[in-house]
Structure formats: C-alpha cells, structure tokens
Amino acid sequence: MEKNNLNQSASGLKVAPVIEGPGGAGSGDDLASGSNIHDPGGVLGRTSMTISCLLDAPDTTEAHRKNLRKVQGIIGRIAGSDVKVVVETTPNDRDGLSEGLVAYKPGTGEVLLRIEEGCEGRLELVAHELVHVEQFLDGDWWYEDGEVKGRDIWDEVEAYQLQHDLNYPDGNSGSYDLRRNPVAGGGYRVTPQDVRDLYDVYGDLPDESRSKIV
Ligand SMILES: [Zn+2]
C-alpha cells in the first residue's frame, strides 16, 4: 500500500531543520553540486543512479524505459530550475503504508519532498512525489495568501498513473487497476474515482482543473 499526500500547506507539519550535505544533492549523485536541490540523504541521487542502472540493463522493456526517462527528465528539470527543493526522510512509522508527500514551506519558498525512511528505494513512490514537484514548476499548484492553491484530483491522477506504470516493468500496467486487480481486456488508465477510493485524503480535491496554465 502506498499513501501519497500533497499537503494543503506545510503548516501543522513538524518540519525538521534541514541539514545540508556538502554535495547539495547528496553523495554519488549526478546532480550539480551547489544546486537548488538540498538532499542531504541523497535520495534523488540514488533514484537517478537506479534509473541509469535500469536503462543500462538490456532486459529492461521499452515501456519501462519510457517511464524511467520520464522520471529522469523530471529530476533534470528540477535541477535546472530555480525552484528550491528540499528532500527529507522521516522516521518510518511502520503503519504498513509507504508514505511520501510534497508540501510548500511558507517563509522559505521551498518545496518539500518527504519520503519515509526505508522507502527511498521505492522508485514508484519517489516518482509520484516528483510529479507533484514538476506540477509546481508548471504552475499546476502554487502558494498564495498563506495557502496552497490549484490542487485538483487530476494532479493525483497524473502522479498515480506514473506510479502505477512503474509498478509494471513488463509494460503491463493497463491489465491491472490501481488496486492491482486484473482488468479484462486491458487498457486501464487511472481515474479520479480510483484515486478517491484509495484514501480519504483525496476526497476533497475538486474535479475541475485549477491549474494556472490550462
Ligand atoms: Zn500525490
């Protein structure tokens, strides 16, 4: 089970002080030192290395390669942007859910990407949260008058679609729904209802797109 939650705002979150590593994005990564990404645990660097490894492997399917390149592209876009992104890991609460979230840190102008410890290696979970960071770059959601605005169910549909696709390296994601039940005839795509059915937290997200950029 995964739980991914773009918080309405970072207020109310217990945000730990960010300790910046010497490499900016952590050790062993290919992101520019001193970049806009502060990732002391090296989560994105390791994600990037995992993707490189999978792209190198001859048995990686073309469908999987496409999705891996998508994730790699998002990391590259973030690294090349002027948006400050802080990547944190938090202690695993062992509630059976692999949790991640993206939030905005008021006062700092930073976008926070948080992953539960031990889940950093779950590419599909990190990818889900990276989609939310990219949505911020695209103006799909923003921070204004003290709150996060622009969130809609389609932001989650997009993030869950990539997560779902990455869960099927054989390229067979259309043959299973979001809960991994077989879909007769295939061709499955993530729907707003399927996302809402996963967790209550998505219940209030509106159907209509609220992006600044249409
Ligand atoms: Zn999400």
Image (cartoon, helix red, strand yellow):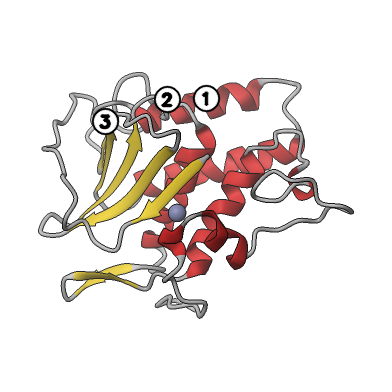
**130 over 189 or under it: above or below:** above
Q: Is residue 83 visible?
A: yes
Q: Earlier in the sequence, mark 3 or mark 2?
A: 3
Q: Is residue 45 above or below residue 159?
A: above
Contact flag, marks 2 and 1 (Cβ < 8 Å): yes
The kind of residue tagged 1 is Thr
Quarter where residue 139 is shown: bottom left
Is disc 2 surrounded by few (<14), some (14 to 19) or many (20+) residues within 10 Å? many
Question: Foreground residue, 150 or 34?
Answer: 150
Task: Please give the residue where the numbered disc 3 appears in the rendered image.
Answer: 33
The span from disc 3 to disc 2 (Cα, nearest Å) is 15 Å
Q: Mark 1 falls on what kind of element?
A: helix
Crowdedness of circle 3 by 10 Å Cα count: few (<14), some, many (20+)? some
Find the distance from the CA under tag 2 to the CA under tag 1: 6 Å
Left-right relation of 115 to 33: right
- Residue 193 is left or right of residue 102, and the answer is right
